[in-house]
Amino acid sequence: MSEIGVFEFRGERYEFPVEIGSENEIAIDIKKLRGSTGGIITLDSGFKNTGSCKSAITFLDGEKGILRYRGYGLEDLAANSSFLEVAYLVIFGELPKKMELERFENTIKSHTMLNEEMKDILDGFPKNAHPMGILSSLTGALTAFNPHSVDVNDEEQMYQAICKTMAKIPVIASWAHSKNLGKPMNYAHNDFDYIENILQMLFTKRNERYKINPIITNALDQLLILHTDHEQNCSTSTVRIVGSSHAGLFASISAGVSALWGPLHGGANQAVIEMLENIIADGGDVEKYIAKAKDKKDSFRLMGFGHRVYKNFDPRARIIKSAADELLQDLDMDDPVLAVAKHLEEVALNDAYFVERKLYPNVDFYSGIIYRALGIPTEMFTVMFAIGRLPGWIAQWREMRLNNEPIGRPRQLYIGENQREFKPVEKR
Ligand code: ACO
């Protein structure tokens, strides 16, 4: 007999079906709660206990520190795969065969041009506009140049839309960077692969050819793999909920970029480096900042620490920490920020406040150190995160549409005034 969840209230008993996931996660299906109880709803701000969908893309066990894309361990993929392979896996469900990977790469290459009128939109931004604002706006603007909505059940249309999105976002990202620097806009070049193109678009100068450094290319490839998907986080849930109204892929992803920007989410990678630089500028007193983070009267939080679902080491942080070490060694660089980060981590992990609350370094704690070593400026860190998260957003949007999910529309508990009579202004 299948299990049921029971809810008793005011002497009445209600039964709800229980669903078991493929990793034995248990969910009580409360779809009929409101209807069968005459209006009772659940209240769960921040969705700490609420599953918004069934998904076959990413498995995450925050207690054990496990992260898998489509059943493959993150460590395995980071060590053996490429970002485009992982993107294909996450979006389409299986690792690509050689021919499939070649077609994916070539189709992406065929879509990397942007309409020149996009430059007119970019011209309207002030030079110091944050690149995340530009990325979000120009991604939304792509809808104007691609006005026809995609038939999600038409495989070829969907495939082309996916490749277009994968192709154009890195170009926009590089334009956002060029805008800040006052440099001419670069384009992708078909002689380069996906990762090389991201780097050459960011760094090519008009008067010289970009020289590939495999150490840098491999480091970025690995970093983007680690960011590819993370199930129902804030930006992904945003993409799904916007897409649930049948808004298009570009519009949904533009909303996802905005959600990612906040310092409690993807914006933390910029905030971490700024925090570490502040600590150094302030004399390097790590304990002082730990004390500030613990002080409930102080709004300061240790950026890059803590996570909604990980109550153990974020597996991505482990990989990134050793990748940062290796990269600095390979490039023969010494970054004082890494030393402060390690010291801060060590003190926090031995401090009762962080231990009791199970606060560990998250993906953003060390990623900025890698971006710095690659020569990427701080304001671009979250943009790089967005490029990495793109396949995840696409995969989740596609899954949501193919599963025909209903429009996302939460309920609320109203705590405002009861009905009042309108008083004309002279009687108030
Ligand atoms: N520094 C100090 N205290 C913290 C921190 C932190 N970084 N994170 C959580 N806490 C404390 C909270 O004050 C709270 O303490 P209390 O129980 O005494 O009130 C407790 O730990 C639980 O924290 P919540 O805010 O309830 O946890 P929540 O799951 O809502 O938030 C979040 C998770 C937003 C990631 C939080 O840990 C945080 O703000 N971290 C810093 C920002 C950051 O690194 N964000 C990136 C996350 S990864 C990503 O999005 C890609």
Image (cartoon, rainbow, N blue to C red):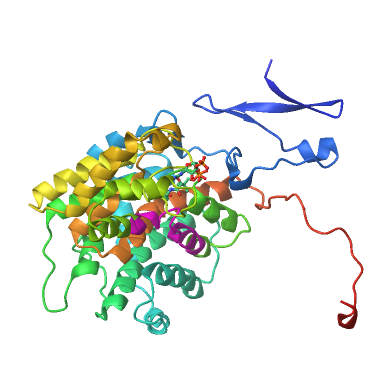
Q: Is residue 189 above or below residue 315?
A: below
Q: Is residue 76 above or below residue 132?
A: above
State whether residue 266 appears in this view: yes
For the point 36% across and 74% down, the residue is 114
Find residue 422 and report its horizontal and vertical position in percent.
90, 72
For the point 26% across and 65% down, the residue is 377
Residue numbers of the magenta segment: 254-271
Is residue 261 within the magenta segment?
Answer: yes
Compared across the picture, whether 271 is left or right of 417 comes to left
Quadrant occupied by the C terminus: bottom right
In this view, the residue farthest toward the left is 332
Find residue 385 and report its horizontal and vertical position in percent.
35, 55
Q: How many marks?
A: 0
Q: Is residue 421 above or below residue 288?
A: below
Compared across the picture, whether 48 is left or right of 417 comes to left
Quadrant occupied by the N terminus: top right
Q: Quadrant of residue 373?
A: bottom left
Q: Which is nearer the eye, 365 or 144?
A: 365
Compared across the picture, whether 170 is left or right of 195 comes to right
Q: Main SS of the magenta segment?
A: helix
Find residue 332 and report its horizontal and vertical position in percent.
7, 52
Find residue 108 and report its horizontal and vertical position in percent.
33, 60
Is residue 84 within the magenta segment?
Answer: no
